[in-house]
Image (cartoon, rainbow, N blue to C red):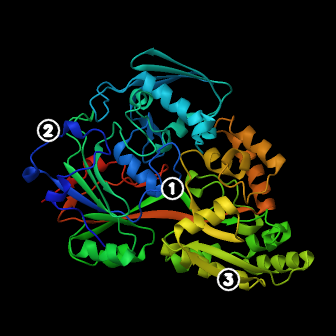
C-alpha cells in the first residue's frame, strides 16, 4: 500500500486539474496545511455526468459544484446558484453566485450552466442522469449570471436532481475549445483542484485559489491515498498516516473509537442496501416471477440489520423510510410475521414447480459488508427451500456481469435515495434507468405510474400513488430494498477538525470538506 507522495514527489506534478498555473498564489510548501483522506476506492471514471458510483461522486464533490445542494433536513439551498425562483410549474430562474470561478480563474457563466445541462441531456453523453432532469424544452442566458429553464411538463424532482453531483457545472468554454476533456480531466469551481493522480494509488488535490467562499478551504492540500483494504485503513488511522476515512459498517468505527484521539461520526442517509434480481435470463430460476416473489418473502431483512449492522440500520423500502412515507410498509414482505412469510414462500415455490431453486448470489469483494449481507440472505432463504451459492468477485467483474452481460441470478448492492422519493423509485422503469435493462423486467403499468408520480407535487394524492407503485414493485419482485445505509466517518481528532452533516440525501458525506481544519 502506498501512502501520500512526499513533498518532493508532489512538486513534480501531472496537471490533470488544469488549474495548476495558479499555484504561484499558494503558500510555500513548507507552510502548507495538509489533510489526508484514506479513500476506500478509486474512481470508476472521470466524467461527472456519466459515472454512477459513489467512489467517483465523492471525488467529484471535492472539485465540482452543482447549482443547488441539500441541507441536513433534505431541503434545498443554493450552491453555485445564490438564488432561484420557480415562476410557474414549469419555469425556473437561477442566479449564479457572484464570485463563482473555475480553478483556472474564469468566472462561471450562464453558458456553463446551459451547456452542462445540455450535455447531460445529449444522448451521445449517455448520462444516466438525463431522465432525472425531466424534459427540458428551452434554456436561455438572460445575462452572464442569470439562466432561465422551461420544462415541457411539470417535474417537481427537477430541482432535487440539480442538487446531485452528476449535475455538476463544467467549464463549457474550455470543453468546446478543446483545452478541457471531462473524460480524462477535472476542472471545476469547487474548493479543490487536481495537482497529481496516480491511478489506483493516490490523488493530490490543492486549494482552488479562486473559490468563491473567502478563506476556504481551510486546508491547502488534500492528500488522498487509495486504500481498499479495510484493515489497512484501520491501521493507517491508528498510526496517523491518514486523518480521516469512511466505513460501511459500525464495527470498525466502534472499535476505533476506543483508541485515543480517534472519533467517529454516523451519517444517516436516504440510501439503502438492495438486491438486484435477474428476471430476464431464461437460465435463472428467477425468470419465474413466483420464484422471485418467494425470495422476497423469505428474505429476513431484520436479521440483516441485527447480524450485519448490530441493529444500527433499519428495515427499508423502495420508497426510503428516511422520507417518512408509509407507502410500502403494509406489503406482505414487510408486514407479515416471518413464519407466515416462509409458508407463503414455500407455497409459491411449489406452484412454480421448483421447491428447491439453485441460485447464485453475487457480492463485490471490495465491500465486505455486501458479503456479510449475502451470508445472512443465504441462511434466511434456505428456510424456504432455496439453495444459495455465494460468489465474492472483484468490482470490475461484478459490474460487467450484472450491468452489461446479465450473467447472474441475483446480487447485493446499494441504491442512492436522493432527496425526493420519486427519484429513487424511477429506477424501476428500465427504459428510464438504462443501467438495469439487462435484468429488469419492463412492466408497462408500473412505468406509466412512475411517469405519472413524477409530475405530482408532494401531497396525499402523491402518497396514494406511491403506495400503488409499491404494490406493483412487490408484485414484480425484481429489485428489492433491504435495510437503510448509514455512512461512518472516522477521524483523528488530534490532527483534524471535521464537520459531517447528520443526514445526506445526495451521497455527499463530505459536503463541508472546505471546513475540515488541519490541526498540525
Picture quarter containing residue 358?
Answer: bottom right
Q: 347 or 176: nearer the eye?
A: 176
Is 104 displayed left or right of 44 in the figure? left
Q: Is residue 212 above or below residue 494?
A: above
Would you say the residues marked 1 and 3 are in contact, meaning their CB atoms lie under 8 Å apart? no
Residue 481 seen in this snapshot: no
Disc assigned to residue 53: 1
Residue 56 seen in this snapshot: yes
Disc assigned to residue 24: 2
Few, some or many residues within 10 Å of mark 3 (<14, 14–19, 20+): few
Q: Is residue 205 above or below residue 6?
A: above
* Mark pair 1, 2: CA separation: 34 Å
Q: Please provide percent x and percent y for residue 357.
A: 80, 81
Mark closest to the chain's N terminus, 1 or 2? 2
In which quadrant will I find the N terminus? bottom left
Is 8 displayed left or right of 298 in the figure? left
* Mark pair 1, 3: CA separation: 26 Å
Report helix, strand or loop for mark 3: strand
**Between marks 1 and 2 in the image, the one whose residue lies nearer the viewer:** 2
* Mark pair 3, 2: CA separation: 57 Å
Q: Residue at x 57, y 77 (%)?
A: 392
Q: Residue furthest top?
A: 142
Mark closest to the chain's N terminus, 3 or 2? 2
Amino acid at each position: 500500500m502506498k501512502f501520500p507522495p512526499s513533498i518532493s514527489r508532489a512538486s513534480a506534478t501531472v496537471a490533470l486539474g488544469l488549474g495548476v498555473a495558479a499555484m504561484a498564489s499558494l503558500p510555500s510548501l513548507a507552510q502548507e496545511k495538509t489533510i489526508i483522506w484514506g479513500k476506500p476506492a478509486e474512481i470508476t471514471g472521470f466524467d461527472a455526468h456519466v459515472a454512477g458510483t459513489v467512489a467517483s461522486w465523492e471525488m467529484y464533490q471535492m472539485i465540482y459544484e452543482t447549482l443547488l445542494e441539500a441541507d441536513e433536513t433534505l431541503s434545498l439551498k443554493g450552491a453555485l446558484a445564490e438564488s432561484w425562483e420557480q415562476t410557474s410549474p414549469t419555469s425556473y430562474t437561477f442566479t449564479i453566485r457572484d464570485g463563482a470561478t473555475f480553478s483556472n480563474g474564469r468566472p462561471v457563466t450562464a453558458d456553463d450552466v446551459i451547456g452542462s445541462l445540455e450535455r447531460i441531456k445529449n444522448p451521445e453523453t449517455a448520462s444516466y442522469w438525463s431522465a432525472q432532469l425531466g424534459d427540458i424544452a428551452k434554456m436561455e442566458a438572460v445575462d452572464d449570471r442569470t439562466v432561465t429553464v422551461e420544462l415541457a411538463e411539470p417535474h417537481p424532482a427537477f430541482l432535487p436532481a440539480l442538487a446531485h453531483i452528476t449535475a455538476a457545472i463544467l467549464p463549457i468554454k474550455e470543453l468546446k475549445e478543446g483545452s478541457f476533456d471531462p473524460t480524462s480531466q477535472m476542472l471545476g469551481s469547487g474548493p479543490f483542484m487536481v495537482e497529481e493522480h496516480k491511478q489506483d494509488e493516490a490523488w493530490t488535490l490543492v486549494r482552488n485559489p479562486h473559490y468563491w467562499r473567502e478563506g476556504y478551504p481551510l486546508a491547502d492540500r488534500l492528500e488522498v491515498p487509495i486504500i481498499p483494504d479495510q484493515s489497512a485503513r484501520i491501521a493507517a488511522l491508528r498510526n496517523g498516516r491518514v486523518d480521516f476515512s469512511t466505513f460501511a459498517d459500525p464495527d470498525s468505527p466502534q472499535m476505533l473509537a476506543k483508541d485515543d484521539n480517534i472519533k467517529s461520526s454516523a451519517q444517516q442517509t436516504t440510501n439503502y442496501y438492495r438486491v438486484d434480481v435477474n428476471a430476464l435470463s431464461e437460465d435463472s430460476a428467477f425468470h419465474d416471477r413466483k420464484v422471485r416473489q418467494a425470495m422476497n418473502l423469505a428474505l429476513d431483512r431484520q436479521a440483516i440489520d441485527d447480524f450485519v449492522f448490530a441493529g444500527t440500520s433499519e428495515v427499508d423500502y423502495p420508497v426510503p423510510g428516511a422520507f417518512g412515507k408509509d407507502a410500502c410498509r403494509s406489503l406482505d414482505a414487510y408486514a407479515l410475521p416471518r413464519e407466515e412469510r416462509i409458508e407463503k414462500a414455500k407455497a409459491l415455490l411449489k406452484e412454480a414447480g421448483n421447491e428447491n431453486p439453485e441460485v447464485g448470489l453475487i457480492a463485490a469483494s471490495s465491500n465486505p459488508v455486501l458479503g456479510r449481507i449475502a451470508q445472512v440472505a443465504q441462511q434466511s432463504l434456505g428456510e424456504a427451500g432455496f439453495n444459495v451459492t455465494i460468489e465474492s468477485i472483484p468490482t470490475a467483474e461484478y459490474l460487467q456481469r450484472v450491468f452489461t452481460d446479465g450473467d447472474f441470478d441475483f446480487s447485493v448492492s446499494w441504491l442512492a435515495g436522493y432527496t425526493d422519493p420519486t427519484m429513487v423509485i424511477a429506477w424501476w422503469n428500465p427504459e428510464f434507468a438504462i443501467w438495469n435493462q439487462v435484468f429488469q423486467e419492463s412492466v408497462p403499468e408500473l412505468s406509466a405510474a412512475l411517469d405519472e408520480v413524477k409530475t405530482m407535487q408532494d401531497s396525499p394524492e402523491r402518497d396514494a400513488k406511491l403506495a400503488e407503485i409499491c404494490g406493483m414493485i412487490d408484485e414484480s419482485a425484481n429489485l428489492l430494498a433491504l435495510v437503510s445505509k448509514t455512512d461512518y466517518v472516522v477521524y483523528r481528532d488530534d490532527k483534524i477538525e471535521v464537520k459531517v452533516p447528520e443526514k445526506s440525501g445526495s451521497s455527499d458525506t463530505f459536503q463541508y470538506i472546505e471546513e475540515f481544519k488541519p490541526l498540525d
